[in-house]
Amino acid sequence: MQIIDGKKIAAEIKREIAAEVDKRKSRGLKIPHLAAILVGNDPSSEIYVSNKIKDCKEVGFNSTLIRFDSNVQENELIDNIKKLNSDYEVDGFIVQLPLPDTISENKIIESIDPSKDVDGFHPVNVGKMVLGIPSFLPATPFGIIELIKRTGIKTAGKHCVVVGRSNIVGRPVSILLSLKGIDATVTVVHSRTENIKDIILQADILIAALGSPGFVKADMVKEGVVIIDVGTTRVVAPETKSGWKLVGDVDFENVAPKCSYITPVPGGVGPMTRVSLLRNTLLAASLKD
Ligand code: GUN
């Protein structure tokens, strides 16, 4: 059994990106610039966004954080998105989700210029991804594919079971895995799936992305399975300094001994997600060269 060190692989990619930024600087090319819009002060979103800004600094990107109160009007948000769409200095931007219930996430995403949509959430980019046309790929699925590739795990012809069908992880990763070049046979299971355990038992590669701590138990997986655990649920943990910890969708302690490879939580998919946004931002800037 091998634990996949996402933190180490992400650090390697970050060094590659930083070297690319240095090269751009020496050639007089534009320094990549990411902007992030944060509405309200959801604690998880605050952490995610501050990490994104920190990552930018680390690799030498410029970054801008734009904050709005949780009672901001949809129109005001769209006006600001339009400004970012036409601001040459900003190569790519994201609107951190979730948004307050009063705001339509679909409307907001559709108002982003697809050429600046480094989250890969705009329908144009989702459509391109489905067709296998180069586009901005959503960060977590992009990170998962890179993690699998850099670990040297074979995907061609393998049965990949994706647990969860969210717009930002389960559905897009299931599409990427079935594309030419990756060539997995993909099954998506979800909350309405019958005999879910029987299907998960057939997985050569299991992507757990349902957000239910410890859902995948040892008797649900076959010997030698590869597990990518995307779950990151914050649970109370009095034994830690912060008082909470991140827990994955897999009962790691009991499942890991049956795996050929498994990602830990934290330190698996999370760092790869963060680095994928940097890759997309670098791509957005380089498309202007
Ligand atoms: N909320 C949770 N994950 C993401 C993400 O990848 N992008 C944005 N914009 N919001 C998120």
Image: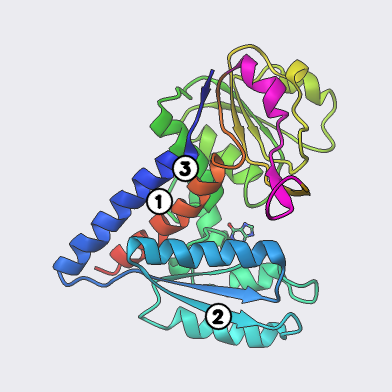
Q: Residue at 54% across / 39% down in the picture?
A: 268
Label 3 secondary element: helix
In percent of width and height, residue 101 lies at: 80, 71
In percent of width and height, residue 211 lies at: 74, 44
In this rendering, the answer to whether 113 lies above or below 284 is below
Q: In the picture, residue 34 is in which quadrant? A: bottom left
Q: Residue at 77% across / 16% down in the picture?
A: 219
Question: The C terminus lies in which quarter of the figure?
Answer: bottom left
Q: Which residue is mark 2?
A: 66
Which residue extends farthest left? 27
Q: Which residue is mark 1?
A: 134
Q: How far, Cα to Cα, is label 1 from label 2?
A: 29 Å
Q: How many marks?
A: 3
In this rendering, the answer to whether 65 lies above or below 243 is below
Crowd band around label 3 with a 10 angstrom C-alpha radius: few (<14), some (14–19), many (20+): some
247 drawn magenta: yes
Q: Amino acid at mark 3?
A: Lys
Tell me the magenta residue range: 239-259
Can you tell which mark lies on residue 7? 3
Tell me: is circle 1 under 8 Å from ligand 1. no
In percent of width and height, residue 278 lies at: 41, 58
Crowd band around label 2 with a 10 angstrom C-alpha radius: few (<14), some (14–19), many (20+): few
Label 2 secondary element: strand
Can you tell which mark lies on residue 260? none
Labels 3 and 2: the sequence-earlier one? 3
